[in-house]
Image (tube, grey):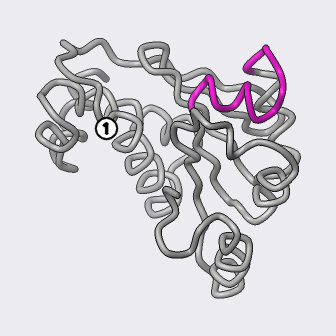
């Protein structure tokens, strides 16, 4: 299990306790080749999630929808906020009832390992910690994910806050 010592069975209790304590709960299901995240168990778990961060394939599989926008709308009935990572196509979410497309930045890609995790960290920092507007947080997260692909390995090119801010400033 990718959930450490808790296992998936313990997540609903853990998430409820975290929310009761006033914490923000985010979830990225990650790669699921065995299909273990499907079904009602995950849909119920999403009701305890503040920020759900699947990629394009995951959101379609979990929602049972071919169309990404429909999948986001479906899962947004459960999770407070659904943010879909789309790699070189950027990211998508729904804010104020409308779908928001945030384009990726063009960078010289060397290795995409960890780009989704970098995106997640950037989004949580921007949206939850800094309380940026959704579109601005998506742009910030796209910068984090994109910059992380410019070096080899999952952490070698992980950008600092200063690097992300400089990158964004240079792009207006």
Observer-nearest residue: 8 or 76?
8
Horizontally, residue 142 falls left or right of residue 100, namely left
Q: Does residue 6 appear to the left or right of 119 in the view shown?
A: right
Residue 25 lies in quadrant? bottom right
Magenta residues?
55-68
Question: Which quadrant would the C terminus be assigned to in this image?
Answer: top left
Q: Are there few (<14), some (14-19), or many (20+) residues within 10 Å of tag 1?
A: some
Magenta stretch holds residue 67: yes
Res. 39 image quadrant: top right
Describe the element under mark 1 as helix, strand or loop. loop
Relative height, residue 131 to residue 23 (above, below): above
Classify 82 as above or below 109: below
Question: What main secondary structure does the magenta stretch of the protein show?
Answer: helix
**Residue in the picture at 63% in, 53% down:** 51
Residue occupying the point 30% across, 26% down = 146
Relative vertical location of residue 8 with respect to residue 104 in this rendering, above or below: below
Residue 169 falls in which quadrant of the image?
top left
Q: Nearer the viewer, residue 134 or 160?
A: 160
Q: Residue at x 61, y 24 (%)?
A: 56
Q: Position of residue 62 (x, y in %)?
A: 75, 35
Residue 43, placed above or below residue 168: below
Q: Residue at x 41, y 56 (%)?
A: 125
Where residue 27 appears, as percent x and y from the top left, is: 59, 54
For mark 1, what is the residue?
Answer: 114
């Amino acid at each position: 299990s990718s959930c450490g010592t808790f296992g998936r069975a313990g997540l609903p209790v853990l998430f409820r306790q975290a929310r009761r304590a006033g914490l923000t709960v985010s979830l990225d299901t990650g790669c699921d080749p065995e299909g273990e995240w499907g079904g009602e168990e995950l849909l119920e778990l999403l009701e305890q999630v503040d920020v759900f961060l699947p990629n394009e394939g995951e959101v379609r599989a979990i929602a049972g929808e071919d169309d990404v926008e429909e999948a986001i709308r479906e899962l947004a009935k459960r999770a407070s906020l659904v943010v879909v990572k789309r790699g070189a196509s950027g990211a998508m979410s729904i804010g104020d009832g409308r779908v928001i497309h945030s384009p990726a930045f063009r960078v010289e890609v060397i290795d995409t390992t960890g780009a989704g995790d970098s995106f997640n960290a950037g989004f949580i920092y921007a949206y939850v910690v800094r309380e940026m507007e959704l579109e601005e947080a998506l742009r910030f997260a796209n910068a984090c994910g994109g910059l992380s692909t410019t070096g080899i390995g999952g952490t070698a090119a992980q950008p600092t806050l200063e690097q992300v801010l400089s990158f964004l400033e240079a792009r207006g």
